[in-house]
């Protein structure tokens, strides 16, 4: 019975019932694995991108101020932008373009023109709340009417007079929905519009007069430290298929072992609490590590030049993926791209042709190292990276930049390395199958 209990627990583990507890314990193993790798390879000395990091593990790039994410004022302004408004916070006005005519549309010579309507932000919110409430109330009347009939009559068809009344409620709900969507793009569910109207009436003047009070200063930490890279999806705000226990965690382990750097957004004031060159600087409660919190991240992929179309030079480029994980901080990708472009200029300038344009054939000379999974095709990474050098469209049909690496060691590490996990699963299947068969026989 003890052996059978063991296999039952194994199957629970495989199904995820006790997986979270296991992950908290084995996180130490993966952190130690990449730190051991770093020690075996001479720490910073033998790691790629020693030139652009000036021999260090990390560098800090100022990002600047933006509205503090998650605050009520940030949510209001983001919602207005989603609805198609341009917001002038100083004047308190929201502007939106709409199509109109110079005269009677049915008469010759009348032209269609774009006009802009300026409204007070408070009025926009109040109208959205009123129209949304009207649509919700109308829909509630329709559903309550239909629900009451079903409770009393079941699936019996409505009588003509009842059906007519119900159809009127359906029409009223549809009209209310259409009226809202004439002015706003998305229906609002919950009570946040009412809350925002009250907030704007009470607090907007304070923020207009003290704009710094709604702003936070951010910085970007760009790191090639293996543990920082390993933890690319190991923060409260950042989760992806590279999180520990997820489908592509082996890619994160591979990436951490001397391949692509990682860029994290942090609050600038938090930098005062750390030494940027310490071994670990990001908080990890599972392993008892004190530090600061990362809000967002971008991976920089390692591309090794193996071809000789432009020169015999052999080097690596760090090219940022376009996808951002975590909190949406304005200009994060652009700042990482600008930094990476500038510090590597001496390498890629050899691909300039016809003045300041990078040749699309440049990609043909590269292979991608590190983890196999990528959010952005290589040609799109290169095209966006060299955007200001006339190359966004030029790379659209470019070839090259294929993944050329091996993750078998990382896959073995995660599986257990010797196939024991697979053998244990086979034994568990045999044991539990036998138990079921015995039970069936006994009955």
Image (tube, helix red, strand yellow):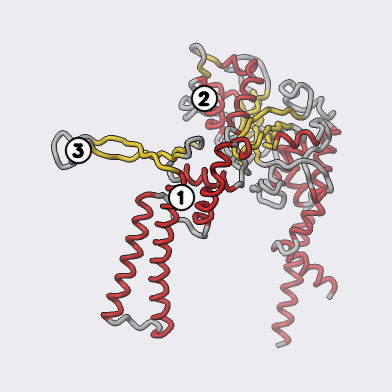
C-alpha gap between disc 2 and disc 1:
38 Å
Depth check: give the residue in front, 14 or 222.
222
Left or right of 229 in this view: 377: left
The residue tagged 3 is 103
Residue 323 appears anywhere in the view: yes
- At x 71%, y 79%, the residue is 437
Label 2 to label 3: alpha-carbon separation? 43 Å
Question: Callout 3 environment at 10 Å: few (<14), some (14 to 19), or many (20+)?
Answer: few
| Residue that mark 1 sits on | 125
- Cα separation, mark 3 vs mark 1, equals 30 Å
For the residue pair 443 and 226, the one nearer the viewer reads as 226
Q: Percent position (x, y) of residue 357? A: 50, 17
| Residue 62 in which image quadrant | top right
Q: Earlier in the sequence, mark 2 or mark 3?
A: 3
Counting other residues with Cα less than 10 Å from the Cα at mark 2, is it few (<14), some (14-19), or many (20 or more)? some
Q: Picture coordinates of residue 274 (x, y %)?
A: 81, 35
Residue 374 visible to an observer of this rendering: no
Whether pointer 3 and pointer 1 mark residues with C-beta atoms closer than 8 Å, the reply is no
| Camera-nearest label, 2 or 1 | 1
Q: Label 1: few (<14), some or many (≥20) within 10 Å? A: some
In which quadrant will I find the C terminus? bottom right
List x then y, in percent, for residue 71: 61, 46
* Picture disc at residue 387: 2
157 horizontally vs 221: left or right: left
> What residue do we see at 68% from left, 27% from top?
61
Q: Residue at x 83, y 76 (%)?
A: 1
């Amino acid at each position: 019975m003890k052996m059978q209990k063991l296999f039952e627990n194994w199957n629970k583990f495989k199904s995820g019932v006790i997986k979270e507890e296991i992950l908290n314990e084995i996180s130490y193993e993966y952190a130690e694995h990449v730190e051991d790798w770093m020690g075996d390879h001479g720490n910073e000395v033998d790691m790629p991108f020693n030139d652009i990091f000036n021999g260090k593990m990390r560098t800090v790039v100022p990002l600047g101020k933006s509205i503090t994410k998650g605050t009520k004022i940030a949510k209001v302004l983001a919602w207005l932008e989603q609805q198609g408004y341009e917001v002038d916070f100083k004047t308190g006005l929201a502007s939106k373009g709409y199509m109109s005519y110079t005269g009677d549309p049915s008469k010759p010579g009348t032209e269609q023109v774009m006009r802009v309507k300026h409204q007070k932000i408070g009025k926009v919110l109040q109208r959205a709340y009123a129209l949304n409430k009207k649509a919700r109330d109308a829909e509630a009347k329709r559903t309550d009417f239909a629900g009451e009939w079903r409770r009393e009559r079941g699936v019996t068809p409505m009588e003509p007079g009842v059906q007519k009344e119900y159809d009127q409620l359906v029409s009223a709900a549809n009209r209310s929905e259409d009226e809202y969507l004439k002015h706003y793009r998305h229906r609002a569910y919950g009570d946040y519009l009412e809350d925002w109207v009250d907030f704007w009436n009470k607090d907007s003047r304070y923020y207009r007069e003290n704009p710094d009070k709604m702003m936070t200063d951010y910085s970007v930490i760009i790191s090639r430290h293996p543990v920082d890279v390993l933890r690319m999806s190991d923060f409260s705000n950042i989760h992806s298929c590279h999180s520990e226990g997820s489908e592509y965690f082996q890619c994160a382990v591979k990436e951490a072992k001397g391949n692509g750097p990682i860029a994290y957004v942090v609050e600038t004031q938090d930098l005062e609490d750390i030494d940027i060159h310490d071994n670990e600087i990001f908080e990890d409660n599972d392993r008892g590590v004190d530090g600061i919190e990362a809000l967002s991240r971008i991976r920089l992929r390692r591309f090794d030049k193996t071809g000789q179309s432009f020169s015999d030079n052999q080097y690596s480029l760090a090219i940022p993926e376009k996808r951002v994980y975590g909190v949406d901080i304005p200009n994060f990708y652009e700042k990482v791209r600008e930094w990476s472009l500038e510090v590597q200029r001496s390498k890629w300038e050899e691909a300039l042709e016809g003045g300041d344009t990078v040749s699309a054939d440049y990609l043909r000379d590269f292979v991608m190292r590190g983890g196999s999974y990528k959010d952005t095709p290589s040609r799109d990474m290169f095209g966006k990276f060299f955007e200001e050098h006339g190359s966004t469209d030029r790379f659209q049909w470019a070839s090259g930049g294929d993944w050329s690496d091996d993750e078998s060691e990382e896959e073995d590490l995660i599986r257990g390395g010797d196939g024991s996990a697979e053998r244990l699963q086979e034994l568990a299947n045999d044991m539990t199958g036998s138990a079921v068969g015995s039970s069936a026989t006994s009955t």
